[in-house]
């Protein structure tokens, strides 16, 4: 066996070993996925901005499926409900929509049906964010109605 043949055999063995390592590395990452994680500590009540979030690789043991938020976009503009630690997955229950309406504030109540629009004012009995269903006491009648919060902070009620 010549020197050239022994080097070629050694190189072939090395390439085979490296290929095996890549396969093992890929299979070990099969249980991993990319999730959003804070870059810095985020405290309760803090609004989450894009510069506070990064994407990191987590194993299924660190973040079980469906228990952590996966998308950075889903976090932007939300508010932390509890302290979020850097480099840790963010639990689904740890963030909430930013509040648009607060308890005890005056809100515009809108009822729409067909071409008919009725507006009134009331007092919010619950706090809520955009799209949340809250209860409002009509200041004229005293009746309590439920409706969804709109982008301008008004509450749209429906029949029933």
Image (cartoon, rainbow, N blue to C red):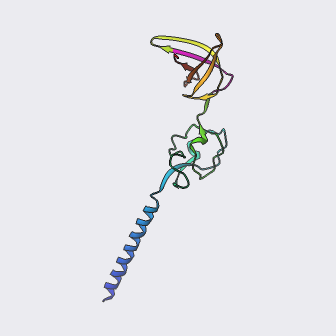
Using residue 32 as the reference point, say whether residue 82 is left or right of it.
right
Q: How many numbered markers are drawn?
A: 0
Using residue 13 as the reference point, say whether residue 53 is left or right of it.
right
Q: Residue furthest front?
A: 160
Q: Residue at x 56, y 47 (%)?
A: 53
Q: Residue at x 52, y 49 (%)?
A: 35
Q: Position of residue 160 (x, y in %)?
A: 53, 17
> Residue 93: which quarter of the image?
top right
- Residue 20 position (above or below residue 149): below
- Residue 49 position (above or below residue 145): below
Viewer-nearest residue: 101 or 157: 157
Residue 48: tell me if it is visible: no
Does the magenta portion include 58? no
Residue 141: tell me if it is visible: yes
Q: Residue furthest bottom?
A: 1
- Majority SS type along the magenta span: strand
Q: Position of residue 108 (x, y in %)?
A: 60, 17
Q: Position of residue 106 (x, y in %)?
A: 66, 19
Q: What segment carries the magenta color? A: 101-111
Viewer-nearest residue: 119 or 60: 60
Does the magenta portion include 104? yes
Q: Residue furthest right?
A: 104
Q: Residue at x 55, y 16 (%)?
A: 110
Q: Quadrant of the N terminus?
A: bottom left
Q: Position of residue 80 (x, y in %)?
A: 63, 40
- Residue 126 position (above or below residue 92): above
Q: Residue at x 53, y 51 (%)?
A: 64
């Amino acid at each position: 066996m010549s020197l050239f043949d022994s080097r070629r055999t050694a190189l072939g063995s090395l390439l085979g070993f490296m290929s095996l390592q890549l396969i093992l590395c890929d299979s070990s990452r099969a249980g991993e996925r990319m999730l959003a994680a804070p870059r810095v500590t985020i405290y309760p009540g803090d609004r989450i901005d894009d510069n506070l979030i990064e994407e990191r690789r987590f194993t299924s043991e660190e973040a079980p499926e469906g228990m952590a938020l996966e998308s950075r976009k889903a976090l932007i503009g939300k508010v932390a409900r509890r302290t979020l630690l850097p480099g840790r997955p963010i639990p689904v229950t740890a963030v909430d929509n930013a509040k648009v309406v607060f308890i005890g504030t005056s809100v515009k109540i809108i009822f729409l049906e067909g071409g008919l629009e009725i507006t009134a004012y009331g007092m919010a009995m619950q706090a809520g964010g955009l799209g949340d269903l809250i209860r409002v006491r009509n200041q004229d009648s005293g009746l309590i109605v439920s409706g969804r919060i709109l982008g301008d902070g008004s509450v749209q009620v429906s029949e029933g």
